[in-house]
Image (cartoon, helix red, strand yellow):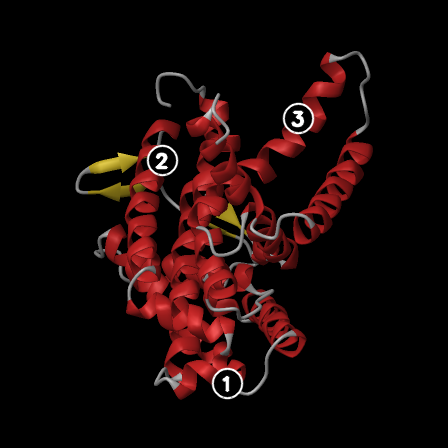
Amino acid sequence: MPVLASDYMFRALIIPFVILAIAAIGLNILVGYCGQISIGQAAFMAVGAYAAYNLVIRVPQLNFLIVLLLAGGIAALVGALFGIPSLRIKGLYLAVSTLAAQFFIDWMFARVKWFTNYSSSGSVSTAPIELFGWTIASPVDKYLFVLSIAIVLTLAAKNLVRGHVGRSWMATRDMDVAAEVIGIRPLTAKLSAFAVSSFYAGVAGALWGFVHLGAWEPLAFNINLSLNLLFMIIIGGMGSLLGAYFCAAFILLVPLLLNQVPGALGVPISTALASHLESMIFGGLIVFFLIVEPHGLARLWAIGKEKLRLWPFPH
């Protein structure tokens, strides 16, 4: 990628794609693997971003990797706190409780000035990241940094979901009463899923603020981002780590294609029409995948690979 892509592609497409994939993996752990609905993933990203910002300005001697781990840990604690209602409620009621977390955290960061270091405008800005003498300032450096974090977190998630922790999540998702009968504690399974999911969201939020945005305000982590992440795992494939990458790329490429392709074909469209078409396409795809292929793009990819492996002998 550093050889092929321009600085604009890194800033506008590739870096956001990698960071959103990290956040989508976290949400997929909670929704796809544990079956707990959440519409507040962006709120936990905001917790990670503001935690990292405050750690950097108040404890400047900390290495940024330690800052990322602490920001993810703080987001995990907040996620586990808001995950406590999942022990009593499920389905639509749980989704509403996570939506309440989204609104509460948005309000908190907008109103409590300590989190923004008493900024008059409510927005915060960050300096370039320094890591072991390496100043991460150029688009290629930022890409290599977030890619390294994404590789580590993806491998960690892959090992988690195929170990005993992941099996307890999936058993709770499939039938929580039966899981409890065979010795799985719903308290541990659900709260650990909320904590791990929020940890991933916190790390993604810190990277989104420090690496991608550089300066942000509370609206950068509003409910639209939470809904986009939920759309991503539905279209990409619930219960699939690969699906998080597929739909992170898809959700970033669709607006670009709507802006570029019609003009190249001699049928230019307005920005407002492109935005409406984007919403219609996402809505239609969500309905399509829920009805036709609930496992999303990841399942279509697996089917395509299997067909190519057997071609030209279908038997």
Residue neighbourhood size for the residue with mark 3, other residues' Cα within 10 Å, grouped as few (<14), some (14–19), many (≥20): few
Asked if the residues shown at circle 2 and circle 1 are in contact, with their CB atoms under 8 angstroms apart, the answer is no
Looking at the image, which is closer to me, 21 or 120? Answer: 21
Quadrant housing residue 179: bottom left
Q: Where is residue 123 in the image (x, y as percent from the top left)?
A: 54, 54
Residue appearing at x 43%, y 49% in the figure: 241
Horizontal side, residue 149 vs residue 25: left or right: left
- Name which residue lies at 37% across and 58% down: 52
Callout 3 secondary element: helix
Residue 60, image quadrant: bottom left
Question: Marks 3 and 2, how far apart in space?
Answer: 25 Å
**Measured Cα–Cα span from mark 2 to mark 1:** 40 Å
Would residue 121 be visible to someone looking at this image?
Answer: no
On residue 87, the disc is 1
Say whether disc 3 or disc 1 marks the residue closer to the N-terminus. Answer: 1
Q: In this view, does 211 lie to the left or right of 40?
A: left
Q: Residue at x 59, y 79 (%)?
A: 90
Nearest the camera: 170 or 129? 170
Question: What kind of residue is marked 1?
Answer: Leu
Residue at image location 58% in from the left, 47% down from the top: 296
Q: Give the label, 3 or 2, closer to the camera.
A: 3
* Eye-nearest disc, 2 or 1: 1
Name the amino acid, label 2.
Lys
The count of marks equals 3
| Cα distance between the residues tagged 3 and 1 | 43 Å
Sequence-wise first label, 3 or 2: 2
Name the kind of residue labelled 3 in the image. Answer: Leu
Would you name the residue on which mark 2 appears? 142
